[in-house]
Image (cartoon, helix red, strand yellow):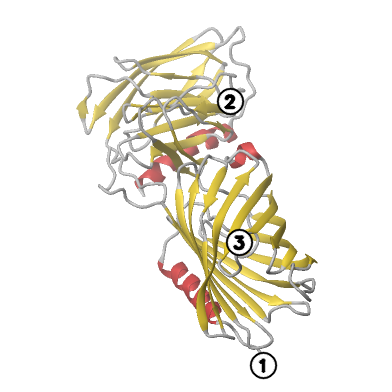
């Protein structure tokens, strides 16, 4: 029996309701996809508060719901700093706990102006997280992001990264590919694929390399004034994948 | 709604006339003419003593831009000049000459941008490849407003305090002439026929009746509703 997470219904209702009652503006949306990072950064000395709600529906009763929250500040016109904190509810324990906190630098390797940057843009994401479980545990993360604008409407992004957790998943590669169509100033529709693949097992006895998984699904985004919302509903297409992974992202810019 | 009417009127004047009579005339060659005249400026029907700042331009032919990069300065919580005419393909520099931050932006369809906030002494440069009207504002100071007119050629001039202007190097032919005042609802138009070595005199009238309220970069009112 398939189970749709609560975030799916909430996300869909929010996007439809917002689209019906809120007029569009010309302000650009920020995150095209729900798992894949993109190459746009906050303007210099600009700020955003960004929130994610993630539902993972697992084959066995191990559903989780994550809440990720971060202020994001434009340090220069090409570099933004995020200071996230993540909480997680687990169905297995029926408890909510602070999962980790950290810092991320997102570095756009091109002029912030689309005309000057050209259609192809590269960005780097460097993160350092401190999981609360695990003494002295630190989790570095690195992503290389490449975006390509084809015409006025099509935006394609490829994402390749790695995360290392000594006591958690070990060394894991993350990969993603997405395509988005800008239907109007307010609405964006896309298709996204995301996955992870273990490379080195964690440094704990009897640990195995993470087999990884891949998920695929549609995304929808809405921009209005200083707010943007993106919602994605991805379905597992490999063994070990969650049945569904949904994520609702929203941000308020200042 | 009014600001869209104004932008549409200017865009039509720039694109429509160009499409109907595009010429690759090389202005500045021997055999060009002069267009000169006066623009009588009034404010809601009452004559203005200072008629300066109106930009008069010609459409119907194209020219490449000059290499220079003009400046739209942020100074004394204002933009200088309030109307900046440039040629399509030219870049504009936005230096901050105030001892506080500004956040220069434009939501105009011709060219939208957000320069972020930078300190005194720094500048940002943006190219303007398409003809049209670009309304420029500051997201921090609602009283700051300027217009960049991106024109198809280099044949434009600003009026002096007496409202007089002179455009030299105009190729022979029949062209549309426009006078743009950012405080007027729409530009004033005239048809001119220029002969090689000749001079055309034009007399125009323009009335400033535009309400310049605008929104911030998020499309929302400023704290005090926006003004100027």
B71 with respect to A183 (left or right): left
Tag 1 secondary structure: loop
Locate residue A194, reporting x and y percent. 71, 67
Q: Position of residue B28 (x, y in %)?
A: 59, 11
Q: On the image, numbered disc 3 is attached to which residue?
A: A136
Q: Looking at this rendering, what residue extends furthest in the bottom direction?
A: A1
Q: Residue at x 36, y 18 (%)?
A: B159
Gap in angstroms between the C-alphas marked 1 and 3:
41 Å
Q: Nearer the viewer, mark 3 or mark 2?
A: 3
Q: Quadrant of the N terminus of chain A?
A: bottom right
Mark 2: secondary structure: loop
10 Å neighbourhood of mark 2: few (<14), some, or many (≥20)?
Answer: many
Q: Position of residue A179 (x, y in %)?
A: 69, 60
Q: CA distance from mark 3 to mark 2?
A: 70 Å
- Decide if residue B177 is in sight here: no
Image mark 3: chain: A
Residue B145 sits above or below residue A178 on the image: above
Instruction: Name the residue tied to disc 2.
Output: B61
* Structural crowding at the residue carrying mark 1, measured as other residues with C-alpha within 10 Å and reported as few (<14), some (14–19) or many (≥20): few
Cα separation between marks 1 and 2: 68 Å
Q: Nearer the viewer, residue A54 or B139?
A: A54
Same chain for labels 1 and 3? Say yes or no: yes
């Amino acid at each position: 029996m398939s189970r749709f997470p609560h975030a799916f219904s909430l996300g869909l209702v929010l996007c439809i309701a917002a689209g019906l009652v809120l007029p569009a503006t010309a302000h650009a949306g920020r995150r095209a996809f729900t798992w894949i990072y993109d190459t746009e950064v906050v303007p210099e000395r600009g700020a955003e508060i960004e929130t994610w709600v993630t539902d993972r529906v697992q084959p066995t009763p191990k559903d989780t719901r994550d809440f990720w929250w971060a202020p994001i500040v434009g340090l220069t016109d090409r570099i933004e700093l995020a200071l996230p904190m993540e909480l997680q509810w687990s169905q297995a324990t029926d408890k909510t706990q602070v999962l980790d906190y950290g810092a991320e630098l997102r570095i756009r390797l091109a002029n912030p102006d689309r005309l000057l940057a050209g259609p192809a843009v590269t960005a780097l994401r460097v993160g350092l997280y401190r999981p609360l479980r695990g003494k002295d545990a630190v989790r570095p993360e690195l992503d290389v992001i490449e975006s390509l604008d084809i015409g006025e409407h099509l935006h394609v992004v490829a994402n390749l990264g790695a995360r290392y957790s000594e006591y958690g998943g070990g060394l894991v590669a993350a990969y993603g590919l997405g395509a988005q169509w800008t239907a109007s100033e307010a609405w964006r529709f896309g298709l996204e694929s995301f996955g992870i693949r273990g490379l080195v097992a964690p440094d704990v006895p009897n640990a195995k390399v993470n087999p990884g998984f891949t998920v695929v699904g549609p995304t929808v985004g809405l921009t209005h004034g200083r707010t943007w919302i993106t919602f994605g509903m991805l379905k597992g297409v490999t063994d070990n994948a969650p049945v569904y992974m949904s994520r609702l992202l929203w941000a308020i810019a200042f | 709604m009014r600001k869209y009417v104004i932008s549409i009127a200017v865009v039509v004047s720039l694109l429509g006339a160009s499409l109907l009579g595009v010429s690759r005339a090389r202005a500045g060659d021997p055999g060009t003419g002069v267009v000169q005249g006066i623009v009588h400026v009034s404010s809601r029907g009452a004559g203005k003593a200072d008629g300066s700042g109106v930009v008069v331009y010609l459409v119907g032919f194209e020219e490449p831009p000059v290499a220079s990069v003009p400046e739209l300065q942020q100074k004394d919580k204002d933009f200088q000049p309030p109307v900046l005419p440039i040629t399509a393909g030219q870049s504009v520099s936005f230096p901050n000459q105030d001892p506080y931050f500004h956040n220069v932006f434009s939501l105009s369809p011709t060219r939208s941008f957000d320069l972020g906030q930078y300190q005194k002494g720094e500048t940002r440069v943006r190219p303007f490849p398409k003809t049209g009207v670009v309304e420029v504002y500051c997201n921090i100071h609602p009283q700051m407003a300027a217009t960049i007119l991106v024109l198809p050629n280099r044949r434009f001039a600003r009026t002096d305090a007496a409202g007089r202007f002179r455009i030299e190097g105009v190729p022979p032919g029949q062209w549309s002439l426009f006078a743009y005042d950012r405080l007027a609802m729409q530009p004033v138009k005239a048809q001119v026929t220029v002969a090689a070595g000749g001079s055309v005199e034009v007399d125009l009238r323009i009335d400033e009746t535009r309400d310049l309220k605008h929104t911030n970069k998020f499309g929302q009112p400023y704290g005090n509703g926006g003004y100027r």
